[in-house]
Image: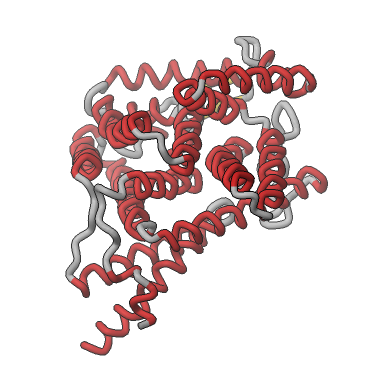
Amino acid sequence: MSFIRSFSIKYFPGLTSFFFLLALFFLPISKALVEIGVMVTIVSWLTLKVLKKEDFFLPKNILYPYALLLAWMVISFVNIDSELAYKGIRGFLKWIEYLGFFVIAAEILSQQKMRRKFICIFFLSMTLVTINGFFQLWHGTDFLRQVSLDPGRITRMKSSLGSPNNLAGFYLLSLPLVFHQVKKFFDEKNKFFILHLILFLFFASAFICTFSRSAFVGLVFSISFYLVIKNWRLSILFFIFLLILLGFSATLRSNFITSLNFNDITVNERLYQWQACWKLFKEHPVLGHGINTFYRRLPTLQLASGPYRGYAHNSYLQMAVELGFVGVLLFMAPLITGLKKFLRDRNSNFNDALWVGLLAYLVQAFFDNNFYAMQSAFLFWFFWAFYFRTKAESAIPETPVPYDEEHHKK
């Protein structure tokens, strides 16, 4: 037994880190490999905690709202019919997986070395996905998973993801980070400046090719918000740049500006879906209809494109239907705390880049299914843990020995 314990303590830290980064790399590529990576990470991390008899570290202002959120999900079972109980259990277990992974990721990313690996792996993954996306535009299907182009109102890149909007969500997190690296290496007169500038232009071009209006709105809002509170003169230059960009491209102007009207079929359909969701919400505004019951509660809608029964295309509204406004507030409480810290202390350009990406993602979630599409959801929990870890260093002690690789080498 002592051999198993010593073996686990010696090798499980490396195993945990490997599968954590494996899940990150395959996040935009394979749901199955992401689930494998996440589950092995969780199991190996919990095993180490039990063997070493260690507690996990999470401040009360983060721990309590999420613990209360899980408790509220259990209470929401009051409104779940017996035939839908299995749906509620599956949804509850998925949220435990998300929140548990957030706790683990925040601890794993306590080391600066792991943060550098995180950025490197994420950029490599996004580079592969971007190459795959441009191949998809040229060939009609991507080379990773044989996914076809989106057949919507315009030819849109989605690479190996389920939709162009999901792919755009990944760029919302990667573009601010790679831009930060460009600025950092430029200031340092580092030779990697050119490499990251090429990478930024590569990602930006792919982001445009998704033609995701929700992601575009999210990124513009987030950058504008950041520039206004940091340097309002830069925000003016940013708006001038946007006007020039849209002015030179009739396609971009049509997609991002003129199509945003009530005659557009997708705008009409979303409004129709939101009206149906709002009626559901008003039936149980406090407790909600129950976790993971949205699809069974939403009636089949007769849209112009045909019968529809699926996502609300508004993550917060869908959450409100399932958990009531109390559930939404509990989910948002830690994020509001993070925003307050961001507004109070903006002395780190790296943390600013993380928050710009997260805020853009959260704005996109008003118009899309970010928290209910598995890959997009894990993307959020990866980066929310990253931001939380780097921003709250004083609140969370340095990760104990389990993830100190140098210690184990000795």
Q: Nearer the viewer, residue 390 or 268?
A: 390
What residue do we see at 55% from left, 39% from top?
176
Image quadrant in which you'd find residue 156: top right
Q: Residue furthest top?
A: 262
Q: How is the image coloured?
A: secondary structure
Kindly tell me whether residue 405 is visible in this rendering.
yes
Q: Is residue 283 above or below residue 408?
A: above
What residue do we see at 36% from left, 29% from top?
343
Of the 4 image quadrants, the one containing the N terminus is: bottom left
- Residue 78 lies, in percent from the top left, at 19, 35
Kindly tell me whether residue 309 is visible in this rendering.
no
Q: Is residue 148 above or below residue 105?
A: above
- Residue 383 lies, in percent from the top left, at 44, 46
- Residue 64 lies, in percent from the top left, at 19, 41
Image quadrant in which you'd find residue 180: top right
What residue do we see at 43% from left, 39% from top?
371
Q: Is residue 352 above or below residue 140?
A: above
Q: Residue furthest right?
A: 138
